Amino acid sequence: MWFKKHLTFLVVFLCGLRLASADVIQLKDQASVSGKILAEKPDSVVIDVGYTALVVPRSVIAGISRATTVAATPAAAVSNSPSISINALPQFYYSDNRPVIARDMQDLVKQIGEAVVQVRTPSGLGSGFFINADGYLITNFHVIEGETEISVEVYHQRDGQLERETYKQVKIIAINKFHDLALLHIEDKNTPKFKYVVLGSSDLLNVGETVFAIGSPMGLERTMTSGILSTKTRQMEGELYLQTTAQINPGNSGGPLFNLAGEVVGVTNMKITFGEGLGFAIPIELVKSFLDHRDAFAYSTDNPNNPYRYLEPPSRTRNKAGNP
């Protein structure tokens, strides 16, 4: 139990790290640990993960891969080159917490535009963005609240032209009603690998820093607006939001707010109705926490508005309580 508990924490901790050269231990629960293998024993493997050495029992290991590939940069990750070694299991999302290196905004919009989508329901529309190549995307909870028919419109770049394609087999994976977040998955057959974004850090943002949003305000898809970060700690209804002068309008909900490295630092979700330049976004740290603990927020058709997943008690406990 001790090993499993601490290994789970370690895998989550390592999710945002980039290892220039790493061995990978693939675990039976589809997780992986990256580092430098120091020793291989009959019953265990010792791996250096940077700040400590971890002893992994052979009983939980599915395979071992040795890799020397240099990790991808954030720009390469946008182009579907994973920021992990080629032999490692794919990450669920890609993160970079290094200091921002500013790039040309026009080039960034061209690279990351395909990763931003339009989310449609019978009652309205919003925006969203892919977090990996397998069709998992983030949007706002209020965009899909109470809906069962969801479609996602994606603009694929083919032969230098943008072609709109609509995917209608969209499944709700997890929801967090209180932080206004939803995780969706496109399950249409024969889907391509999708372009995706890298998640940055809102903690590293500075007030006055340039940010920009891409979304579908009023249904005008692929609209880009830019501004500055007005404050990092605007309190609204007990939650802290990023406040920005980038124009946010109905239809932007669920879309990404980027820094000048092309990394997502927030999820746009509201504005002051009678005012301009007063937009708000959910800090990306909350999104990462939501993704890391998505099993706790798993969507259930039995209780679709419940942001938490309540587990059944162990059978032994039920029997002691006199339950069948």
Image (tube, helix red, strand yellow):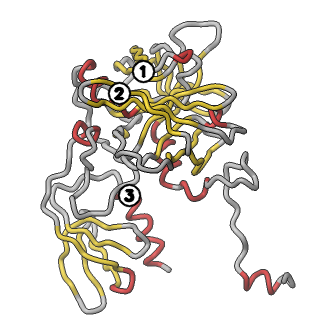
Q: CB of mark 3 within 8 Å of CB of mark 1?
A: no
Task: Say which label, 3 or 1, has the lower sequence index.
Answer: 3
Examine the image and state in which quarter residue 101 appears. top left
Label 2's element? helix
- On residue 222, which mark appears? 1
The C terminus: image quadrant: bottom right
What is the CA distance from the residue labelled 1 to the residue labelled 2? 7 Å
Which residue is label 2 attached to?
113
Residue sitting at 20 percent across and 46 percent down? 72
Residue sitting at 44 percent across and 67 percent down? 8
Q: CB of mark 1 within 8 Å of CB of mark 2?
A: yes
When the figure is inspected, residue 123 is found, relative to residue 33, above or below; the finding is: above
Residue 161: x percent and y percent? 29, 24
What is the CA distance from the residue labelled 3 to the residue labelled 1? 34 Å
| Residue that sits furthest to the bottom in the current view | 42
Examine the image and state in which quarter residue 206 appears. top left
When the figure is inspected, residue 32 is found, relative to residue 126, above or below; the finding is: below
